Amino acid sequence: MLSAESSSHQVRRFVAMHRRRRFLKTVLGFLSGAFFFQDPILRGLAATAGKTLLPKGTDRKALLDKNPATLDTTNLEVTPLEEFGTMGLSDHRTDLKTWRLGVAGAVKKPLNLSFEELVSISPLERDVLLICPGFFANHGSWKGVSIDRLLLMAEAEKGISHVTIKGPQGTYQMTKRFPLDDVVSQRVFLAYEVNGRRLPGKHGFPLRTVAEGYYGYDWVKYVYRIEAEIIKE
């Protein structure tokens, strides 16, 4: 039989071991959450989970009545820019000498970035499908900037829940609010190039929203302002 002292020692060892394991699980859980969206492989697996994989050679016309949020476009060919469809405002003109992207709302250091400053930020590139229901489907190779990075530069306040994107400035302004999760996962970002070329005017130059899983009417064009928001539901 074990002595009382030996038994007590084993209990203390067991408790200490249990605490260490619980601590490690907590730390690993935090780290996996913190770095999940920084890992392209994990991000890709999450993005395609439960979606319908489109085979190579899929006719884009067959996608006009589909929900982009349900499609895995890994095998889908990039649409030539000349074949891109467009809807809504397409003739807005922007003077880059005066244009600025404002980053405001729940941030400590609001930003007003020129186009040159914007493109100097480490870029984000992704192939994302845009579907305008009943009209066209464009699968583009988009290049731009992560909204998450902009929020970091602006020192966004704790508790941010949504980001609102606005454009263009003036009579025809559109506004779309996205959950922060879509921004952090880089499903939603801002593009200034498509298919290796500067974004054409009719497609929203100098900056447009790319929103994976959203219909085309949510892809705000001619973006000039984003706002960080804290919305308590």
Image: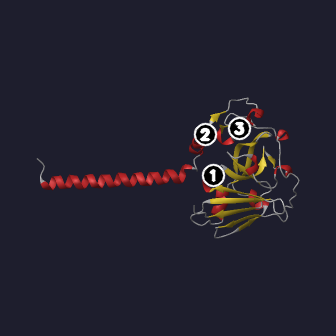
Callout 2: helix, strand or loop? helix
Mark 3 or mark 1: whose residue is earlier in sequence: 3
For residue 182, the mark is 1
Quarter that holds the C terminus: bottom right
Q: Is residue 226 left or right of residue 9?
A: right
| Label 2 packing within 10 angstroms: few (<14), some (14-19), many (20+) | some
Dot 3 alpha-carbon crowd within 10 angstroms: few under 14, some 14 to 19, many 20 or more: some
Marks 3 & 1, CB-CB < 8 Å contact: no
Query: From what the image shows, is residue 138 above or below residue 144?
Result: above
Measure the C-alpha gap from mark 3 to mark 1.
20 Å
Q: Amino acid at mark 2?
A: Thr
Q: Quadrant of residue 76?
A: top right
* Residue neighbourhood size for the residue with mark 1, other residues' Cα within 10 Å, grouped as few (<14), some (14–19), many (≥20): some
Question: Circle 2 sits on which residue?
Answer: 48
Return the mark for residue 66. Answer: 3
Residue at the spot 20% in from the left edge and 55% down from the top edge: 9
Position of 21 relative to 107 (above/below) = above
Up-down relation of residue 157 to residue 72 (above or below): below
The amino acid at mark 1 is Asp
